[in-house]
Every structure is written in structure tokens, then in C-alpha cells.
Image (spheres, rainbow, N blue to C red):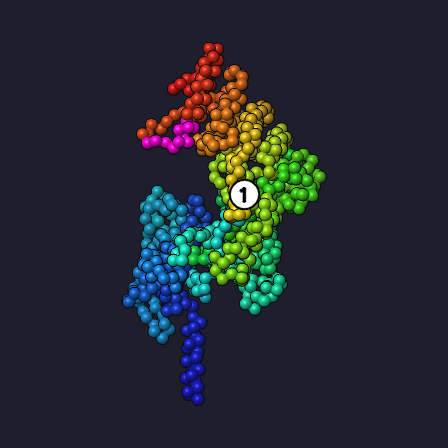
Amino acid sequence: MCKLLLLLGLVFCVMRVDAENPLKIVKRGKAYHLEVSDSLLGRDLLLGARVVDLSVQKNISAGQTMGNPIVVRFVSNGKMLNMEKLVSQAVWREDDPAARLIARNNTVPVLHVFDVVAREEERRVTVIDVTRYFSDEINEVSPLPGGIKQGRLEPKASGIVRFSNHENRVNVTTLYAYTGGKEPFRVTINYTLLVLPKEQMRPRYDDERVGYFSSAKTVYNTTKKVYRPKYISRWRIEPKPEDKEKYMAGELVEPMKPIVFYFDPATPPLVKKYARLGILDWNKAFEAIGFKNVMQVKDFPSKDFNSEDLTVNCFRYIPTIDANASGPIWTDPRSGEIIQADILWYHNVVRLLQEWRFIQTAAADPSVRGKELDEETMGELIRYAVAHETGHTLGMKHNMRASFAYPVDSLRSPSFTREFGTTASIMDYARNNYVAQPGDAARGVKMTPPLLGPFDYFAIRWGYTPLYEANTPEEELPLLDRMFREKGDDPVYLFANMAMGPVVPDPSGQSDMLGDDLLKSATYGIANLRYIMKHLTEWCADEGESYDRMKEMYEAGIKQFYKYMNNCASYLGGVYYLPGTVGQRERRYIPVDRERQRETVLFVLKQLEESGSWMVDDRLFGLIGDKTDLIMGRQGEIIGTLLSPNLLSRMITSTYSLDEYLSDVTNYLFAKKVNSDDLYSRNRQIAYVIALKKLCETDGKEEPKKASENLRTAIARGEAVRLEKKLERWAKSSGEAKFMLDILKR
């Protein structure tokens, strides 16, 4: 009997040790000790931080982070425990003949050294004191933006305030107080130390044809040259082991680990109601590849729920004046597996959504002309924005090519827009249907983007379909390539990355545009703006209210007009880029033809010339103030853009020659003698002269410029000489012409 009790005791002891958390924080007196199981030595851990609360909301709010987590390891070093940080992006097989040499060139550096305070052999646990570590600033994972902290850390008012232990992680929350600066500052930060999966998710290599967030690796293999693939960011969506056969047979199954978003209790009810729908909309795309209930939403399970935990996905309501939304993610850098994601919803984004809906569709849709939108309309906008950000949390980047997939006139078709919306992907910046004209909404034309577009379904299929036929990322490549080839040249399955700058090089891949003909869609959009501006004093006159809304919508209309102009200007020197692999396409780069480019510059100049007739409204200006400076400033910006060095450099080899282009711009702007009574015409002429003069100048450096820059300068000088001759004739009777001539001759 005693032997049996002893045996049971030993079994119980082993079970207790195995069941304990491999990481555990224990408070002993004033000290905080971290117990590290031997099973974790050498294992990869993720260390990250997030703001819990703060005294100054400056470029960051509670619940956010500006830092990225890091991968660390604990390695025993006698009486010490080293925390090492993985910094290398190198990848190699352990059985590679050169593995030892590769490893010697990619060693893991020590980040911090902890003294061992106890060693419990029976439990196979090493105990270290982490009081000082978590009480001091951990700069490697600081969630704070630069410049927010002032003064020095005051230890007497700082320190660990709480901790929690979980199955695969620990959380430590620390209060930091800073004094002695211009303003005192206080912030509470939650740190999470998470045990990463021992068996990594199989990476999937990025492909420029689809667009996922990714991280680059350097792969060493002595049988081939070194190559640098990118691991896409994606969740580990796979069937439960017991459901794998059902999945393979085509049956819908639930994933082993669904993606669960918890709603911040502070979220307004209206936002929560439609945000929930936006998150769940993505379930349709997962169902198309065999998974159900992948996306789930829940409320906080308790009042003390730690939403700052590294493993918690959260819809966070950010109470700031900023008008924005985003979908940041944290990944396991070893494989690209997404560990955690947030949807950040800034308070004023609702106002921005309403502004876009008004300025883009109020001409066609009378229901959006009032101060407040009805719940259904506002809810639709919230749902769209949240679904877009949810796409980011799934690893997807913006697809700026999607709205170019549809013919412009199709966007005025009730049947087409009801089925397809305005774009082939919700990850585009397509906004609302500014092509629709007065009366179109009454005919049933849809004013908003789709819930999900065909490209979104394809992107989920490409990124998340388990490929059991393959055993390595390399073996997946032909299977993934086959997905693209099945779609051929169908424009709804084309992708373009987000390009920065006012005039992007590929006219088919840019934000805030609609349709496959930018001049045509801009013509529709400008017609709507004219109509809206004409009725601002009627639609934005709210009895007893200030004129702020009228002023804001006027300025939004001006901004929208110049978006159209910049979008159209991308045709100038533009090149359509069609990503693809060898054998898929005859050409990847297709220059915009000369006729379209020349048509574009004349279109832009004509619209600038006519803009004064509808932007200038004495009655409106009497209510919101004179906006002449705003109009002239914006006109000058467009002229400056038309003569920007970047745009002109790409026209050096364009089918529309730079000589002809500058000649056409000069001839249009100076077709008539300088008119002292036409304020806006003179403004455009002066802006052009200043920009042309700047092109003619050299930087004074002795180093030779690029050949294209020299050629650009020479062509600009030739055009300046031609313009000088015209201005010399006009200067005899015009002070303004003499002023412009003086600028060119300085």
C-alpha cells in the first residue's frame, strides 16, 4: 500500500511539473522572479510591448504600439542566463554541407544577461530576477514614438504594477514616470513574453502578382545560388487533425485556430454593429477555400480582460481628433505567421467617411446631402472601412490596380454596380462612385465599393489554401503560379502596389480613382463637383449652426478636383506595369501611347482654365470667406507637378517627346497675351515661368549629372528661350509680361 501511494505521488509530481507553465512570474517580497523551464532553453520567444495608458496623447493612444516585437532565446551560461536576440535573416538547412560555416557568420548576439538566483533541479527550472529588467525602459521593444518622453525616469514613482501567467506566455505591466522635462510624462506599458511554436508554420513565398505584407530572408543552399525570398504574413489556418480528411474531400470545416477579434467596450454601438459585419464579411472568402467560421467577433469576457496581451486581437476605439483607421499586425518573423492583429478605429474617421460620401456622390444621391446620414448609409460606410482594415489584418496590402479593372460606363449601370460595386477589390482606395450622375441613384446605381471583390477571393485562395501536395515553400511555387495562369489576363485579377507621390508612374495603379479611362471618369467627377458646389449654400445651410460644414465641404471639393487632376497626369510619361513570370506575358511594361498623353495634358490645362468659373462664387465666399489664395495655390501646385523633374525625366524616353510636351504646355498657357484682368490666368502663367526657370538652373556641383538630367535641362532651356522671345514682344505693353520675363532672365 505504501509503495502504491509512493508511486501515485511520483506520478502526481511529474504531472504537476509537466502541467506547469514553461514560463512563470513569481513575486517574492519586492522581487519579481521569472521561472524558465529547461524545455524552453534555446527555444524562440517573442517579446513585445503595448501602451496601456498615458498622460499625453501624442501620435499614440492607449492600446497602440509603435514598436515591433523581437525574437529572443534564453541560453544557460553557468551561473547566468543569457537572453539572446535573433537578428539574422539568414535561412539554411542543418544538413547542408556548409551549414557550420553559414552558422559561424550568423551567430546570435546577447541582448541581456540575468543572474541565476535559484536552480530547482526537481522541477527542471532556472529562476532569474527580472525586477530591474521590467522596471527599466526596454528600448528594443518600446511602443512609444520618438520625442514623446521628456526628462528622466523617476524610479520612486515607477515600477511593476501587475503580472499574469498563462499557458504559453507571461505579461508584465510597468508604470513609468518621467520628470524634469518641459512637461511631466507618465505611461503604463504591458510587456508580453510569448513562447513561439516549436513547429513553425511552413512559409509561403511572396509574389508581386498578389500583394501580401512580407519579410525578406536570405536562403543559403550549396546546390544553388543564394536567393532572397520574402515570407508573406498570414495566419495559420489549417483543419483540425481529425477534420483533415473531411477537408480534403471538399467538406467545410472549422480551422484548428480561428481568428477572434474582441471589441473594445468603448466602441460606440453604431460602429460596433457594422464593424462586426465588416470583419465577418471575410468568412465568405474563407468558405470558398473550405473553411467556415474563420473570422469571429466577441466582447471582452471580463472587466479585467487584458486586451494589451500580445495574443489578443482587438477592435480598438481610439478617441482622438485624427480621422484614420488601420489594421496593424505582429508576426512570427521565422515563418511569417501572424500572431496578433488590431483594427484601430479613430474617432473622427466617421466624419471623414461622411465627407467622402458627400463630395463624391451628393450630386447623384440626394440622401447624403444633409448634415447627418441615416443609419443604413453610415453603417454601410463603416462596414466598408472595417472590411478594408480587416484585409490588412489578414496580411493583404492595398491593391491599387483593382478599380482600373472596370469600364467607366459600367459604373453607371444599376445591374453591374449592384453585383460588382466600384472596384474588383475592397483593398483598393476606390471610395465611392463619383462617376454616377444626378438621377443614377434613383435608377438603382450603387454608390459604394463591394463587400468583397473577386480579387479578394483570389488573394485569400492564393495565400491561405493548404497545399498538401508540396513539402517545402519551393515546391509550392508551381502550384501557386498555376492559380495565376488560370486567370490569364482578366483585369480583375491584376495587382498594383501602392505608389507614393502626386503623379504615380503607372496610371492603372493609383489611389482614389475609378474606371479604366481616367479622363472620362474625371469628366464625370468634375461635372458632379460643379453641381455640388452650386448647391453648397442650400445643402450645407443648417439653421442655427455655424458655416463650418459649408466651408469644409467646399475645401473638400477643391481637394477632390485636384485628386482628379493628379490621377489624370499619371498618363504623362506613364507606363502600364503587368507583373508576371517568364512565359506568362508578351510584355510587362507598356508605355502610354502618345495620343493619350497629349490628350491628357490638354485636358488638365483646360480643366484648370475652366475651374475658376465654378470654384469662384461670390455668394458662397460671402459666407465662408474668400478662397482665392486656396484656388491659386492649388493651381500653382498642378502646374508645378506638370513640370516636376520626376515627371519630365520619365518623358525623356516617352512616346510623347519632352520637346513636344513643353511646347504644348507653353502654347496653351500663353496662347493669349497676358491679361491683367484675368487673375487666375496670370497665376498659372507665373507658376509655369517659375517652374520652367527652376528646370533651367544647375545645382552648381562639379560632379556630372545623369545624362537624362542634362538632356532635361537642355530641353527646358530651349523652351525657355522660345518663351522669352514671346514675352519680350508682350513686355512692351504689359507689366505682368515684363515681370515674367525678368524671372526667366535672372
The number of numbered badges drawn on the structure is 1
Tell me the magenta residue range. Answer: 703-713
User: Would you say residue 461 is visible in this rendering?
Assistant: yes
| The image quarter in which residue 437 lies | top right
Q: Quick one: label 1, few (<14), some, or many (20+) residues within 10 Å?
A: few
**SS at badge 1:** loop
Q: Residue furthest left?
A: 79
The residue shown at (56%, 69%) is 242
Residue 149 at x, y = what percent? Answer: 37, 46
Does residue 647 show up?
Answer: no
Q: Nearer the viewer, residue 178 or 327?
A: 327
Residue 585, percent from left and from top: 54, 45
Q: Nearer the viewer, residue 457 or 434?
A: 457
The residue singled out by tag 1 in the image is: 586
Q: Point out the image quarter for the N terminus.
A: bottom left
Give the residue type that dot 1 points to. Answer: Glu
The picture quadrant where one finds residue 542 is top right
- Image position, residue 658 (x, y; %): 48, 28
647 relative to 277 in the view: left or right: left
- Quarter of the image with the C terminus in it: top left
Residue at 47% across, 12% down: 729
Q: In terms of depth relative to the viewer, which is nearer, 34 or 503?
A: 503
Position of residue 74 relative to residue 499, above or below, is below
Residue that protrudes farthest toward the right in the picture: 443
Q: Quadrant of residue 705?
A: top left
Instruction: Identify which residue is drawn at 39% across, 52% down.
Output: 142
Image vertical order of residue 448 relative to residue 541, above or below:
below
Which percent across, then down, holds residue 255?
A: 56, 62
Residue at point 68% right, 40% down? 413
